[in-house]
Image: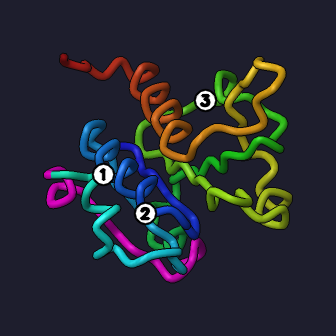
């Protein structure tokens, strides 16, 4: 199982989409407070539709709190357009945590500096693209992880 971590998410629609994605991929969704919205907001539930009740959802006061509860062998991959290493080159494995920052500013530079060896970027060869939507990025990463594990994906 993979772990999808949203660090200080701001947009309820993206969190709802991430919840649906977590259900579809058998992943766990972790939300790091503060959240820019209430989980009771209709936009979260609307995007999650009838999936929300099935989301394996965990909320945390901080990323450090989540890391302290994870198994010692757990790996946390931080995603940023500013990272040097490409997702395609990372040795993903079952149980990995995929951490994404807030939609408007991404993960803090200090966090990326402290974890430079585990910071990854999604390749974007298009010359006019500077970033991708949060839920789109999460989908790319989760499905790449599943592809590498050769998990059966049914239609």
Residue 129, relative to residue 34: is it above or below? Answer: above
Quarter in which the N terminus is drawn: top left
Q: CA distance from mark 1 to mark 2?
A: 9 Å
Colour setup of the view = rainbow
**Which label is found at residue 47?**
1
Q: Is residue 113 magenta?
A: no
Q: CA distance from mark 3 to mark 1?
A: 31 Å
Mark closer to the chain start, 3 or 1: 1
Is 119 displayed left or right of 6 in the figure? right
Q: CA distance from mark 3 to mark 2?
A: 31 Å
In front: label 3 or label 1: 1
Q: Residue at x 45, y 61 (%)?
A: 71
Mark closer to the chain start, 1 or 2: 2
Point out the stretch of residues depicted in magenta.
50-65
Q: Position of residue 135 (x, y in %)?
A: 48, 44
Residue 7, relative to residue 99: is it above or below? Answer: below
Q: Position of residue 8 (x, y in %)?
A: 57, 70
**Nearer to me, 128 or 35:** 128
Q: Residues within 10 Å of mark 3 (few under 14, many from 20)?
A: few
Q: Secondary structure at mark 2?
A: helix
Q: Residues within 10 Å of mark 2 (few under 14, many from 20)?
A: many
Q: Residue at x 51, y 82 (%)?
A: 61
Residue 127, relative to residue 78: is it above or below? Answer: above
Q: Position of residue 43 (x, y in %)?
A: 34, 62
Is 53 displayed left or right of 70 in the figure? left
Q: Give the residue at mark 2.
A: 12
Q: Quadrant of residue 125?
A: top right
Q: Give the residue at mark 3.
A: 91
């Amino acid at each position: 199982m993979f772990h999808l971590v949203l660090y200080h998410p701001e947009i309820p629609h993206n969190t709802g989409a991430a919840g649906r994605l977590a259900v579809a991929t058998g992943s766990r969704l972790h939300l790091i407070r503060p959240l820019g919205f209430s989980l009771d907001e209709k936009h979260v539930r609307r995007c999650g539709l009838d999936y929300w009740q099935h989301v394996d959802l965990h909320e945390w006061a901080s990323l450090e709190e989540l890391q302290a509860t994870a198994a010692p062998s757990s790996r946390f991959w931080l995603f940023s357009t500013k990272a040097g290493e490409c997702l395609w080159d990372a040795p993903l494995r079952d149980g990995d945590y995929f951490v994404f920052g807030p939609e408007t500013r991404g993960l803090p530079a200090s966090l990326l500096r402290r974890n430079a060896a585990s910071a990854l970027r999604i390749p974007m060869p298009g010359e006019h693209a500077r970033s991708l939507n949060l839920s789109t990025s999460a989908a790319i990463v989760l499905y790449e992880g599943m592809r590498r594990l050769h998990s059966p994906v049914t239609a």
